[in-house]
Every structure is written in C-alpha cells, then in structure tokens.
C-alpha cells in the first residue's frame, strides 16, 4: 500500500489501520500542483478500497507548511484568465470530488502555513488538529481571484458568515489560537505534541466499529445546512449497523468486560 505519486510529491503509507497522505513539496511549502491533485485522487481511491484503512491522516512534509495553497508557478500557464481557470478546475475536480466524497474519516494534521486551497483541503477533512505554529488564511482578495460557492459554503459552515466574511474580505492571516476560537479547527496543541495527538485520535477512531463511524460521517454530512439529504441512505446506514457482526461483537465485549474487536462486518 505504501507508495509515491506525482513524481514523489504525494506519498501514501498505511500502518495500524491509519492511512497517511503526505503533501511532499516542502521546497514550495507543499503548494498543490495539478499533478498532485491527480496523485491525491489516486491515493484516496486506493485507501477507499483498502479494508484495513479505517481512518486517513493528511499532513505536509517538513515543518513550514501543511499546504500553502495552489502552486503559483502554474498560474500563468494554467490560470491566466477565466477560460484557463475553468480548465484548471476541470483538471483538479477529480481529486477535489474524491476528497469531498471520501467515505472514511479524514484528519488534517496542520503545521505552519495552511492557506488558500490548502485551507480548502483542510476544511474538507472531518477533523482539524493544529500545532500552535499554524497560520491560516484565504489570500484570494490579494491575488485578484475569488473562490466559488463550494469552498465558501464549507468555510461558512465551520465559522459562520461573520467570520467567513472577515477572512475573505480582509485576506488576513489568523493564528492557531484565533482559528480554534472561531471553530476553524477542532484542537490546537504544542508543536511537539501534534503528531502524537493526531495519531492518538486516529487510533481511537480506527479501533471503533467502522460501520458506526461511516454512518456517523454520512449522517453528519447530510445534516449540514444546505446539504442534499438522502433519508433512505441514512436509514440504510443505521440499519446496517444493527445488522452487523460488529454490533454482536460489541454486545459480547460489553458483557465480557473486554475491549471489542471490530472487523467492519
């Protein structure tokens, strides 16, 4: 399962039920190129199909950035005007859609810069845990561009319209303390504790019943404001849990006073 994609700029690793995706372009603060979006999509496909992967962690190589945004060196060639932007969107849509629709929990482990499209990636994760050195922002207004309704709606669902407008209108950067205060991230920890904290949360999720976690992800996502609601899908997810071997294992483990051993069946 371990491997590299996009000429080594995207890395994948699996251990103990946790799939780790590393954005690996530290010389450019892990800025996302079109090829990296393709690599991200390929890794997500692999992790989605891998039964042993129960949770995914997103992280950036080095200590300076999670993802600092889009690779600006590609702007002249691939984002020079509205037509070029539409083509850029077409080229990167696959990776974006696969991240948005990924069926397993995703945790963003954030150090340093988390800006623009990088913040967009982090916001698509289910959980965001940041080191105290993290910095967040959407610099679109300083570049003369704008983000579409998808990313804007996600931002508003996390921080509310007032904080979203402040971030978008001013294009200013905020630190980790401000990010946790407004609800942009779930938790901020000292940098030296970041990896341990993230992997502790990931291990806890990986040890829980996969069908229960998947149902929780599906239902919480569908109940977000503005989301399309498929009540039949939600009902099926709940029923699948009650009909599962894991539910029977959970009951037995509770009666036996031992930790359950869930298999996702």
Image: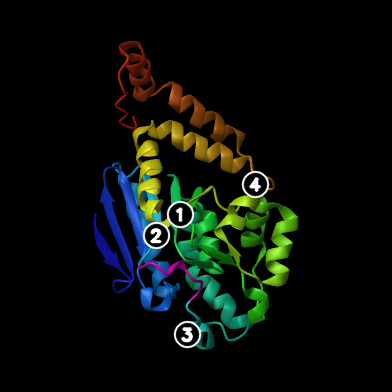
The answer to whether residue 216 is left or right of residue 170 is left
Mark 4 to mark 2 CA distance (whole Å): 27 Å
What separation in Å lies between label 1 and label 4 (alpha carbons)?
A: 22 Å
Quadrant placement of the C terminus: top left
Q: Earlier in the sequence, mark 1 or mark 2?
A: 2
Coordinates of residue 139 in the picture (x, y in percent): 62, 73
Query: Which residue does the image show at 54% across and 65% down from the upper left?
Result: 135
**Residue pointed to by mark 3:** 73
Assess disc 2: are there few (<14), some (14-19) or many (≥20) residues with their C-alpha within 10 Å of its C-alpha: many
In primary-sequence order, the first of circles 3 and 4 is 3
Q: Is residue 65 magenta?
A: yes
Against 190, residue 39 (above or below) is: below
77 falls in the magenta region:
no
For label 2, the SS is strand
Which image quadrant for residue 86?
Answer: bottom right
Callouts 1 and 2 close, C-beta under 8 Å = yes
Identify residue for label 1: 108
Task: Give the image's coloring scheme.
Answer: rainbow
Residue 230, horizontal then vertical, whole percent: 60, 38
For the magenta stretch, what is the residue range? 62-70
Name the residue beneath numbered marker 2: 59
Gap between marks 1 and 2, in whole Å?
6 Å
| Label of residue 227 in the image | 4
């Amino acid at each position: 399962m371990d491997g590299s994609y996009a000429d080594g700029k995207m890395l994948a690793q699996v251990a103990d039920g946790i799939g780790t995706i590393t954005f690996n372009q530290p010389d450019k603060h892990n800025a996302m190129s079109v090829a990296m979006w393709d690599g991200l999509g390929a890794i997500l496909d692999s992790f989605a199909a891998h039964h042993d992967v129960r949770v995914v962690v997103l992280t950036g190589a080095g200590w300076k950035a999670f993802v600092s945004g889009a690779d600006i060196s590609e702007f002249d060639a691939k984002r020079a005007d509205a037509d070029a932007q539409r083509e850029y969107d077409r080229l990167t849509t696959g990776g974006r859609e696969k991240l948005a629709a990924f069926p397993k929990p995703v945790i963003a482990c954030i150090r340093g810069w988390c800006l623009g499209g990088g913040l967009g990636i982090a916001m698509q994760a289910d959980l965001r845990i940041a080191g105290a050195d993290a910095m967040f922002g959407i610099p679109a207004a300083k570049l003369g561009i704008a983000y579409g309704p998808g990313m804007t709606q996600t931002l508003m669902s996390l921080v509310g319209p007032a904080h979203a407008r402040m971030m978008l209108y001013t294009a200013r950067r905020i630190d980790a303390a401000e990010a946790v205060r407004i609800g942009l991230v779930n938790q901020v920890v000292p940098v030296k504790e970041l990896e341990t904290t993230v992997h502790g949360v990931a291990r806890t999720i990986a040890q829980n019943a996969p069908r229960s976690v998947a149902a929780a992800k599906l239902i919480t996502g569908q109940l977000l404001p503005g989301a399309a609601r498929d009540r039949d899908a939600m009902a099926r997810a709940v029923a699948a849990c009650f009909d599962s071997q894991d539910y029977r294992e959970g009951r037995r483990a509770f009666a036996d006073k031992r930790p359950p051993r869930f298999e996702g069946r």
